[in-house]
Image (cartoon, rainbow, N blue to C red):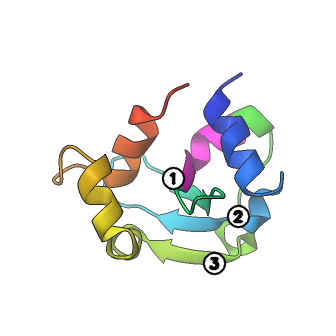
Amino acid sequence: MDKRFYRFLQATCCNWHNSFFVDCHRCDGCSGFLLSVNHNAVPSIIPVAVFEELSGETVDKYDCIGIMTLEGFQRFYTSWLVWNVEDPKRCSLSQLWESCQQ
């Protein structure tokens, strides 16, 4: 099983309802991301499609603790993203998901 999934579950106390839904329309076919933070305030993310596949649950963004846009996420984590994202022209959430160790 994907370690990123377990890290996300740990950050949300095993309840995806404790996460933010990040509405991302930048990538084709993207159904958004679930976002929480770990004990060091580092973002813990998972694409909604991956979460649904691994958990067997259907995510409704209105059941999350909040909804934010990709731009809102990027503004909130501006300084942190400078050090953790290589291509500022690509979706930062996709890059973070790809760069996480499995």
Q: Quadrant of the C terminus?
A: top right
> Label 3 belongs to which residue?
66
Q: Amino acid at mark 1?
A: Ser
> Label 2 belongs to which residue?
60
Q: Do we see residue 79 in this rendering?
A: yes
Q: Secondary structure at mark 1?
A: loop
Q: Amino acid at mark 3?
A: Gly
**Residue 54 image point, x, y percent:** 73, 33
Q: Is residue 57 left or right of residue 73?
A: right
Between marks 1 and 3, how big is the CA–CA gap? 16 Å
Count of numbered labels shown in the rendering = 3
Q: Is residue 4 left or right of residue 91?
A: right
Which residue is at the front of the view, 95 or 23?
95
Between marks 2 and 1, how big is the CA–CA gap? 11 Å
Q: Is residue 59 left or right of residue 68?
A: right
Residue at the image position 59 percent from the left and 42 percent from the top = 49
In the image, residue 69 lies in the stretch drawn in magenta: no
> Label 1 belongs to which residue?
31
Q: Amino acid at mark 2?
A: Asp
Q: Secondary structure at mark 3?
A: strand
- State if disc 1 and disc 2 touch (CB < 8 Å): no
User: Which of the two marks, 1 or 3, is nearer to us in this view?
Assistant: 3
**Residue 33 image point, x, y percent:** 53, 55
Q: Give whichever of discs 2 and 3 has the lower sequence position.
A: 2
- State if disc 3 and disc 2 touch (CB < 8 Å): no
- The residue lying furthest to the top in this view is 1
Q: Do we see residue 58 in this rendering?
A: no
What's drawn in magenta, residue-wise?
Answer: 43-53
